[in-house]
Amino acid sequence: MPSERPIEPCAEADVPRDVQLELYRLMLLQRLSEERIMALYRQGKIVGSVYTGYLQEAVGAAGGLALGPDDVVLPINREMACHFARGVPVDEVLGHFLGRVTGPTRGRDGNMHFGYRERGVFPLVSMLGDLVPVAVGAALAFKRRGEPRVAMTFFGDGAFSTGDVHEGLNLAAVLRVPAVFVVQSNRYAYSTPTERQMADTDIARRVEGGWGIPARRVDGTDALATYRVMRDAVAAARSGEGPHAVEALTLRGHGHAAHDGALYVPDELRAQYQDPIERLALRLRLDGAGDEADAVRAAAEAEVEAATAVAEAAPWPDPATITDGVWAEPLP
Ligand SMILES: Cc1ncc(C[n+]2csc(CCOP(=O)(O)OP(=O)(O)O)c2C)c(N)n1
C-alpha cells in the first residue's frame, strides 16, 4: 500500500486541462488493465509471470503523451500506458496476455514482449538496457533522413548499470541524435536497493556529467510535472539539440513480478511515495474538474470491463500456425 498521509495534489502546472484528463485516462487504463491481468493470472488464465507499473503509471503516460504521432517509443514492462497513448486497444493487450489470436503476437507471447510497428511502438526485449542502442539507431535514422522525429525509450535504475546503456548514451551524445532517455528510478532492481547497486544514485547528474546529455530529475508520482519535463525534452530533441534524459523518481509499488511480495521494502520508504493517480485526481478536483475526472474514470472502468469480455471470448491460435511469423520467409 502507498502512503497513509493525506494525498498531496500534483503541483499546479502549465498543462492544458484536456491533456491533464488524458494523462488521467492513460494512467487509469494501465492501472485497471494491470489489476485485471493480475486477477486473471491468479485464476490461472495467464501463464508465466506478470509485471506491473503500479505507482509508476505517470511516467509512461507522460512520456507517451509527450510524443508526436510520427515519433517512436520503446517502452519496457512498467509503461503499459505508452501503448494506450499510441492508441493500442485495451482488448488487444488483454488478449495478448491471455495468449489469444487477437493479441499483437497472435498468441505467441503472454508478457510485455509486443510492439505495434504501424503505431511506432517497438517491442520490449528482456535483456536489460538493450533497447537503448536500438532507440539510438532509430533516432540516428531520423537524423540522417532529415525527419523531425524523436525516439523515446525507458529503462530502470538496474538497467542503468549495464554496459549497453552506457554505450548507447555515449553514441547518442556523440552523434547528437534526437532521442529521449527516461530512467525509471524506482528504488529497487529485483530486491536490490538502488544504493546497494551504485555508489552515486543521482542518475541524472551522472548522465549529464558523464555524457553531456541534458538530464532533468522529476517527481515521477506527479503526472503534470513529469509531463512538462517530458514535453520539454521531446521538443528540445526534435529541434536539433541532441539527446535529452529524464530521471523519474518513483517507487516500484509491487514486487518485481507477481511472485514477489516485496516484503523487503520498508514501510518508511513506502510512506514517502503517493499514488500518482490519486494525486492527479485531487488536482483536477481542486481545479473544478472533479466531474470530468469522475467521467473519465467511469469510462476507463467500462472500457477495461468490456475489453476483458472481448479478450476472454477471443479464439486461441491454431497450432498449425505455430511457425507463422517466426521466419522472414516460410520454409518450403
Ligand atoms: C542483461 C540482463 N541482466 C539481468 C537480467 C535479469 N533481470 C531482469 S529484471 C532485473 C532487475 C531490473 O531492475 P530495474 O532495471 O531497476 O527495473 P525495475 O524492475 O525496477 O523496473 C534483472 C536483474 C536481465 N533481464 N537482463
Image: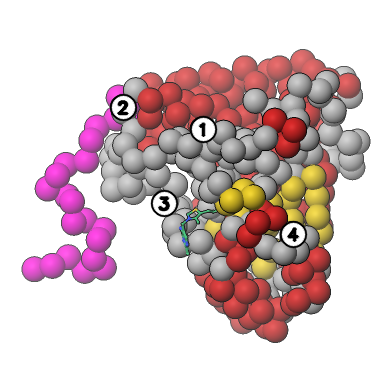
**Mark 4 residue element:** loop
Numbered circle sitting on residue 261: 1
* Residue bearing mark 4: 201
Give the Cα distance between marks 1 and 2. 18 Å
Tag shown at residue 177: none
**Residue count near mark 4 (Cα–Cα under 10 Å), binned few <14, some 14–19, many ≥20:** some
Image coords of residue 186 (percent x, y): 66, 47
Disc 1 to disc 4: CB gap under 8 Å: no
Closer to the N terminus: mark 1 or mark 3?
A: 3
* Upstream in sequence: badge 3 or badge 2: 2
Across and down, in percent, residue 12 comes to 91, 36
Queried whether the magenta region covers residue 319, the answer comes back as: yes
Q: Which amino acid type corresponds to the residue marked 1 in the rendered image? A: Gly
Would residue 49 be found to the left or right of residue 224 on screen? left
Q: Which residue is mark 2?
A: 44
In this picture the colour scheme is secondary structure
Q: Quadrant of residue 155?
A: bottom right
Q: Which residue is mark 3?
A: 113
- Where the C terminus falls, by quadrant? bottom left
> SS at mark 2?
loop
Q: Say above or below: 257 vs 24.
A: below
Going from N to C along the chain, the mark reached first, 3 or 4, is 3
On the image, the x and y values in percent for residue 2 come to: 69, 28
Nearer to us in this view, 124 or 191: 191
Magenta span of residues: 311-332
328 versus 210 height, above or below: above
Callout 2 amino acid? Gly
Classify mark 1: helix, strand or loop.
Answer: loop
Q: Classify the position of the N terminus by image quarter.
A: top right
- Would the CB of label 2 be found within 8 Å of ligand 1? no
Q: CA distance from mark 1 to mark 3?
A: 23 Å
